[in-house]
Amino acid sequence: MSAPTDRANSGTGVHSPTRARISARTLRNDRWWLPPLLTTLGLATFVIYAGVRSYVRAAYWVEDYHYLTPFYSPCVSASCVPGSSHFGVWFGHLPVIIPLGFLVLPFLLGFRLTCYYYRKAYYRSVWFSPPACAVAEPHAKYTGETRLPLIIQNAHRYFFYFAVIVSLINTYDAIMAFHGKGGGFGFGLGNVILLVNVILLWAYTLSCHSCRHITGGRLKHFSAHPVRYWIWTQVSKLNTRHMALAWTTLATLAITDFYVMLVASGTLSDLRFVN
């Protein structure tokens, strides 16, 4: 048993004077550090890729088939290439430090960062609060989500509404992409990728804990609200897959953007089924 330290006497978390004073960080002998490490690598890979792609301003729009990468949607400034502004031009030319998808990127980032699953993921892998079960966190004090920066997590329900709007925008983009070379209806591999991406994005958005509360929260008697109860049960089924959808949509977003980039740059020809 180690001697008491100033940190142990002054802490309010696991280092509180009322907690057992164990010098070892953990008594676990398994590879408890592996899941947090893989989570960090996975999230970092997506953040780096998405960050780079959001700023390059190249190969994000395929004129022939109206493919628009979700990282640049909606593109509503004069800096956007002709044809990519599905909702018109609202702003003039933007400086290079502002991504063309700036209108929704902060809200999407806020929605992901405050998501209940991602909280668990990066609390353990980045914030180390705690890094794993039965592993002491390195913080001397614990304030939960009552102070900055973690108090921002309480805004998750508001970010959810913006996420619904963004999903509607992505759905519109996917519909607009049924465009053939030279005009008219067209259908290709890019359409399949865009559709799969938007369907999974809807599944991830609607499986959100906030959506579950909106549909069935504060109901004292489900029998008196059969429609809301049915919706709540469907959202609850999706909610059990929220973690899988969180990771899957990161992958589909990157795949969709990468495919559009390859076609837009001429590296790859879109496989066409119709026109």
Image: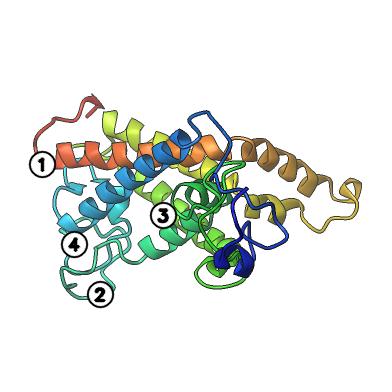
Q: Which mark is residue 169?
A: 3
Kind of residue at disc 1: Ser
Q: Secondary structure at mark 3?
A: helix
Kind of residue at disc 3: Ile
Q: Quadrant of residue 146?
A: bottom right
Instruction: Please name which of the two marks, 3 or 1, marks the residue nearer to the observer.
Output: 1
Q: Is residue 61 above or below residue 4?
A: above
How crowded pointer 4 is (Cα within 10 Å; few <14, some 14-19, many 20+) is rated as: many
Q: Which mark is residue 91?
A: 2
Please report whichever mark, 4 or 1, sits nearer to the chain's N-terminal start. Answer: 4
Q: Is residue 268 left or right of residue 25?
A: left
Q: Measure the alpha-carbon separation of dots 3 and 2.
A: 18 Å
Task: Give the residue number, with chain letter if any, for mark 4.
Answer: 80
Q: Who's the residue at 23% across and 55% down the image?
A: 84
Kind of residue at disc 2: Phe
Kind of residue at disc 4: Cys
Q: Which mark is residue 188?
A: none
Task: Give the residue number, with chain letter if any, for mark 1.
Answer: 265
